[in-house]
Image (tube, helix red, strand yellow):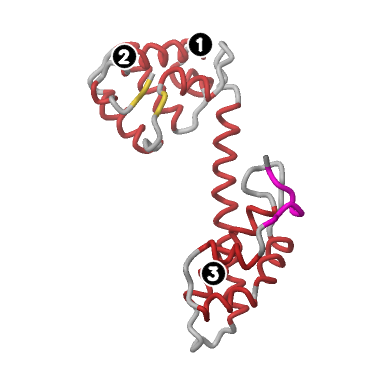
Amino acid sequence: MIKSAASSTAPDSEKIQRVTTMDEQSRKLSEDHLYLVRRIVLGTIGLNESIQGLGYDDLYQVGCEGLCHAAINYDDSYQTPFSAFAATVIRNRLISHCRNVGRLQARLNYLDAPTGCEDGLTGQDLLADNLSIQEGLTDEEALSLLKEVEKDYTGVCRKGIEALRFRFMGHSCKEIAAHYGVKPNHVSAWISRAGKRLRTDKRFSCLQH
């Protein structure tokens, strides 16, 4: 369950201490400038409590991590005041975090969206049915592996592997079908055939049914 902004129970000093091990000077810098985190989170970043990672508590924690990073790396010989230096670090850390959440959210939306195939499969169904990938195998690694084995297959199976590569690159079944000049349900059938064959290929030992 995503917490609201008012539900944070850990004291700010505890959040700072929990992030990393710092010397006393860095810790004091962080605690003295905690106001920056709240100001930047509320004034710069768009909160969305309905999305995991974009609620106030999550963003505040990320901001605290940015503040700690700034305190640890700040050199008092800098011409820039710590408050300005820290604000930049916090803002950049939050922007990077939000981009990562956005990419994940887009991925989740893709998995829930129809593939465009006539059988009504979603992206989640398609991948779970035909290439259920264990944690640790990235899309790039899957693409590389599919490209490697594609040359060893022929006919419908080869078309299915190629279609899977297109799917991993973000193309819909309709787009793939248009490329081949066939109906989308043909593409779905090719992928199903390829998935069955690949499960018996020892190079895909990292895949699970």
Residue 41, percent across and down?
69, 61
> Image check: 80 left or right of 163?
right
Highlighted magenta segment, given as a residue range: 2-9
Residue farthest along the right direction in this orientation: 6
Tell me if residue 10 comes above or below residue 79 in the rendering.
Answer: above
Residue 193, percent across and down?
37, 11
**Is residue 93 a member of the stretch shown in magenta?**
no
Q: Is 176 or 148 nearer to us in this picture?
A: 148
Q: Residue at x 54, y 69 (%)?
A: 68
User: What kind of residue is marked 1?
Assistant: Asn
Report the Cα–Cα distance between label 2 and label 3: 51 Å
Q: Residue at x 63, y 53 (%)?
A: 58
Q: Residue at x 24, y 23 (%)?
A: 151
Q: Earlier in the sequence, mark 3 or mark 1?
A: 3
What is the secondary structure assignment of the residue under circle 1? helix
Q: Which mark is residue 68?
A: 3
| Residues at marks 2 and 3 touching, judged by CB atoms closer than 8 Å | no
> Image check: 205 left or right of 171?
left
**Can you tell which quarter of the image residue 36 is in?**
bottom right
**Can you tell which quarter of the image residue 51 is in?**
top right
Report the Cα–Cα distance between label 2 and label 1: 19 Å
Residue 67, percent across and down?
57, 69
Q: Is 122 or 65 nearer to us in this picture?
A: 65
Q: Earlier in the sequence, mark 2 or mark 1?
A: 1
Tell me if residue 197 comes above or below residue 57 in the rendering.
Answer: above
Disc 2 residue crowd, few under 14, some 14–19, many 20+, Cα 10 Å: some
Most common secondary structure along the magenta stretch:
loop
Report the Cα–Cα distance between label 3 and label 1: 53 Å
Q: Which mark is residue 185?
A: 1
Quickly name the residue at label 2.
197
